[in-house]
Structures are given as C-alpha cells and as structure tokens.
Image: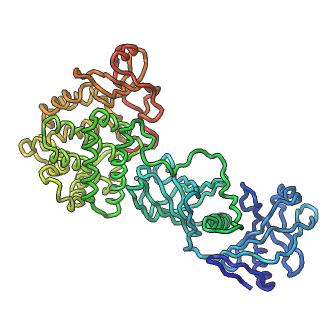
C-alpha cells in the first residue's frame, strides 16, 4: 500500500519492502544516518534482507559509531532503490553479531519506508529563514564568492551571490570549487558548471544556475539527503495544527558567523555617502551582466541613476568624491565609470553647464567603458597587445554604442564626446577613429584628461598604480596628446593632494584626504592603520586645527591592491 504525497511515498506492503531493501545490499547502496545536529550519511553494508527476519548491517569500516548505536541513539537506514531515495524509520537495535574482525548488528525489519521519488529536475526550494551558505570559486579567481543557496536538486542548484562579486562569472564556465554549508555545520563540495547568470539590481544580487557534473555515488547520496531535508524543513513552514513536523537537524544552527544574505550591496562601505552611492554601483554591476547576456542599456534606468549621481554630487561634492575610493567591492569598470562621472560632472558644474548637459555627461561617463566586458576574456587579460589585438580592443566603443540605441534622451553630442571620443588623442594616436586636434571638441578633450587621471591611478596587470604627482607630470609632458590648458584646469580644480588621496604625515600616521580648504590643503582627514583601500574599520576623523598633531604632510601613498581585485 502506498500513501502518496507530492514527492514522497510511504511503502508498507511486505513484498515492496523486501524489494526496496534488497537494493541496499548492493555495494555503496546504503548509508546510516544519526538523528542529530551534525549527522551526515555514514557508509554501511546491508548483509541480509528476509521478510520477517532482522536486518544484518555491517559497520566494520566505521566501527567507531558502535558505542552510539548501543546507547540507543536514533539511527536511520537510507539509500537508493528503484530510482528513489528511501529512508527507514529509526532502527530498533537488537544485538551485535559477526565473526572476528567484523562489526555487525541486527535490527528489526522495518514496518515501512519513506520514498522520495527520483526526479532529477525537481528542485527543493529554500524558504525565507532557511539559510544555506555557498562558496563559489571559478576561473582565474583567487578568492571565492560567498552567497546563499536558493534551491537544490540532484542535477544542480540556484545560487544568489553579491552583484559585484559575481561580475567575472560566465555561462558554461567550469567551477573550481562549489561548497554548500548548512546551518548545523555540514559541508558538501560538488563538481559543477555555471549555466546561467542573471542580475537583479533592485535586490542588488545575481542569480547563478549551476549544473552538477561527474557526481560520484557518495556525493549523490549526500545530495539525496540534502534535497529531502530541505523539502522536509520547507514543509514545516506550511504546517498548521497541534502536530507540526519535527525540524531537520540540518537547520539547527551553530554559530558560524553573520549571514551573508541579509547585507545589501555596499552596506559595509566606509562612509554614508559611499553606502548611498552603492545603489548606483549595484545598477551598473547589473547592467554589465545584462550586456554580457546580449541586452541593451535600459534608458529609464540610466536616466534614473544619473539623476541620483547628480543629486549626491550637488548635496555634498566632497563626500561624493571621497566615496569613489570606497567602492571596494564593485567591478573595476564600475569604480572607474563612477569616478569619471563624478569628476567630469564636478568640472562641468564649475564651468556653469546646465543640469541637463551635466546629466548627459554623467550618464555617458557611467557607461563609457562597459563595452569592454563584451570583448573576449583573453583580450581583456592580455598584458601586451599586438597591432591586431589593439584594433580588436578598440571595438569595445562601437559595441557599447550599439547597446545605447534605446537611450534617445541622451544628447548625441555629449555621448559622442564622452563615449566615442574619450580614448582619442590630439596627435591622432587614440582610438577608435584616430581623430586629431580640432576634430575633438572641448568636452572630448576634458573627458580624456579625467579618464586618464583615474585610469593611471588604478593598477593594471602590467603596472602598478601611479601617484598623483606622477600622473600630473605625465599629462603635462605629453602636450601632443592632451590639451595642456585642460590638464592645468583639472589640477587647479582638484588640487595636488586631491580628495581620496592617501597621505603619510610626519608622525608616520596614514590618513585619507576627505575635504580641502580654499587653498587646496587638507582640512579633514580620516585616520587609517594601513594602506589598504578604505573599509569600515577606519580610524577617527581629524579636521582643521586638529591636523597639526600629525605634523607635515610628507607624501601621498599608493594604496595596496585589494585581494582578488581585477584590472579595468
């Protein structure tokens, strides 16, 4: 007799029981499972199955569990039979048997078993409050991405990962390591391949579908067990009445640290302004994924977030400028785009340009480099480019412009200057059109200066980041490429110790420059113990007369590269 539920059956018929339990006598066919918080399947051998007679179970390979069995610890027999995962009720221990060198015990023949039908496509969904952490390491990454499991099946799973941290993920990409970690501390590593990547800028996360590959029988038994326990725990949330289902031991939590799912993107950024700007960077991170999936730049979203950037800049320009060095979890292309957008818009405001023009400048600058994600990965990672590779690399400009076709509100003149011409040079050595001199308008020339200042201040695979003074000297010594009057305007506006610089003072103290006085000298700094990018553990803030205790500003320091960071 079988009482069917949505995915389970309770088998009581003696003949069916005999057939199902006989399947457990095959090598690797059976495991034991204690009903405790840290339990996981333990390999065992079922020796004899005869209806009405005790089962004989061999645990010679794991004899250390004998004491727990003799104490009467609740113990289940689990395994695969007839394309389903079966589980007995708690075994009734009877006696120890077996010859020399063997550890075996007898238990009463079960009166039923529970079956979970083998449906590889069935996905056990984790409901709110069921937190299973994941650690995903792919490709050339040195640091795994941390996230949460959303569903699990025998064939794969769905993950939710931080939006920015997942920007290096590609469909059909092999996974170095995928590890599931349950609340009770159990862990399982599964071989997998990424199948789809979908961003969600509103929730500031990315959903990643993984397909399991080359799963051995032991891992598959664990997957059966975990799928069943997830479904069991999920069912508890919908049970009403006086006899709720007992909780799954998998979800009895240990203190394994703070959850990674409840923290929005940028929640740990160093300043309030950086945390507000993180909503814009989350949008850009999501837009990168959309481009990789063949989508376009969404006109409405670009307009909305450009307005937000302008609003934050108008509210507190110095806080917004400093925030650009705090976006440490974002993709380098996003960090660069935000920095160029804020600085170019700040210069435009000082020049008295209208808000509509400044909004178009912000929008164009935010996305101006995003087309690089559409280039082949080997081209993006190359340390040195041949002439042919340089020509292919320049295609990122046209690739992006194709995806901007729906943004009809965006001024064509501004887009041409900031997107299409930002990489041009006065001597014709730039790309994509090798324009010269008067062929480049003032905005294109200014955008080129802002773009190069920020890019040279960031590390690349073939060089370290440059100091501000080194960057200024480079631009001023290359008047054939850059408009020197605009380079000088940039230096006057942002100063020789720009906001966002890391300074070392005479007493050895390091501090981030946050605000400047009218003379371009620091009037507010935030102390730091290391040259790492600014995180949420910065020291106190000193301003005005308090700065005297630090002594003379001796030098600007290039921050250390953040572990796992990639180049623009």
Residue at (71% x, 63% y) in the render: 246
Residue at (66% x, 52% y) in the render: 253
Q: Quadrant of the C terminus?
A: top left
Answer yes or no: is residue 237 visible.
Answer: yes
Image side of residue 406 versus residue 61, left or right: left
Look at the picture and state if 118 lies above or below 280: below
Residue 154 percent coordinates (x, y): 59, 69
Q: Quadrant of the N terminus?
A: bottom right
Residue 423 percent coordinates (x, y): 20, 45
Residue in the foreground of this view, choosing between 189 and 235: 235
Look at the picture and state if 12 lies above or below 374: below
Image side of residue 59 versus residue 252, left or right: right
Answer yes or no: is residue 220 visible.
Answer: no
Residue 198 percent coordinates (x, y): 41, 61
Residue 371 percent coordinates (x, y): 28, 54
Residue in the foreground of this view, choosing between 39 and 62: 39
Residue at (36% x, 29% y) in the render: 558
């Amino acid at each position: 007799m079988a009482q069917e539920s949505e995915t389970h059956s309770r088998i009581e018929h003696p003949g069916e029981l005999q057939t199902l339990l006989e399947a457990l006598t095959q090598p690797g066919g059976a495991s034991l499972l204690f009903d405790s918080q840290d339990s996981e399947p333990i390999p065992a051998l079922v020796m004899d199955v005869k209806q009405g007679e005790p089962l004989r179970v061999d645990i010679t390979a794991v004899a250390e569990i004998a004491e727990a069995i003799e104490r009467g610890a609740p113990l289940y027999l689990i395994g695969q039979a007839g394309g389903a995962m079966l589980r007995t009720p708690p075994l009734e221990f009877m006696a120890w048997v077996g010859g020399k060198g063997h550890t075996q015990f007898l238990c009463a023949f079960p009166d039923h078993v529970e079956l979970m039908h083998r449906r590889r496509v069935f996905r056990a969904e984790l409901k709110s409050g069921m937190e299973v952490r994941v650690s995903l390491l792919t490709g050339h990454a040195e640091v795994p991405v941390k996230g949460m499991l959303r569903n699990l099946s025998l064939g794969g799973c769905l993950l939710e990962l931080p939006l920015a941290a997942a920007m290096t993920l590609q469909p059909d990409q092999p996974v170095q390591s995928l590890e599931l970690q349950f609340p009770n501390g159990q862990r399982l590593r599964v071989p997998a391949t990424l199948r789809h990547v979908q961003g969600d800028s509103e929730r500031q996360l990315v959903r990643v579908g993984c397909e399991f590959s080359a799963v051995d029988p032991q891992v598959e038994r664990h997957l059966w067990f975990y799928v069943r326990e997830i479904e069991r725990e999920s069912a508890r949330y919908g049970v009403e009445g006086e006899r709720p289902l007992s909780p799954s031991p998998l979800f009895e939590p240990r203190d394994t640290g703070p959850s990674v799912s409840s923290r929005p993107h940028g929640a740990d950024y160093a300043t309030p302004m950086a945390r507000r700007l993180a909503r814009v960077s989350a949008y850009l991170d999501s837009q990168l994924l959309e481009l990789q999936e063949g989508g376009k730049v969404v006109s409405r979203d670009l307009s909305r977030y450009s307005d937000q950037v302008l609003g934050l800049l108008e509210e507190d320009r110095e806080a917004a400028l400093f925030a650009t060095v705090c976006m440490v979890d974002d993709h380098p292309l996003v960090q660069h785009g935000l920095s160029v957008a804020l600085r170019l818009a700040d210069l435009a405001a000082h020049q008295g340009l209208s808000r509509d023009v400044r909004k178009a400048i912000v929008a164009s600058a935010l996305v101006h480099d995003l087309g690089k994600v559409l280039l082949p990965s080997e081209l993006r990672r190359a340390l040195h480019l041949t002439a042919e590779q340089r020509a292919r690399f320049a295609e990122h400009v046209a690739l992006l412009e194709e995806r901007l076709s729906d943004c009809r509100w965006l001024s064509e003149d501004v887009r041409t200057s900031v997107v299409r011409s930002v990489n041009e040079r006065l001597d014709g050595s730039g790309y994509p059109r090798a324009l010269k001199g008067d062929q480049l308008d003032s905005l294109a020339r200014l955008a080129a200066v802002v773009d190069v200042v920020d890019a040279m201040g960031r590390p690349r695979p073939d060089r370290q980041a440059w100091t501000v003074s080194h960057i200024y000297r480079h631009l001023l010594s290359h008047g054939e490429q850059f408009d020197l009057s605009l380079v000088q305007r940039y230096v006057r506006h942002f100063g020789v110790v720009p906001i966002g610089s890391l300074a070392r003072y005479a007493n050895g103290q390091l501090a981030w420059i946050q605000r400047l006085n009218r003379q371009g000298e620091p009037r507010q700094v935030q102390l730091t113990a290391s040259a790492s990018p600014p995180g949420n553990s910065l020291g106190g803030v000193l301003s005005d007369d308090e700065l005297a205790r630090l002594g003379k500003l001796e030098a600007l320091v290039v921050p250390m590269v953040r572990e796992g960071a990639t180049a623009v």
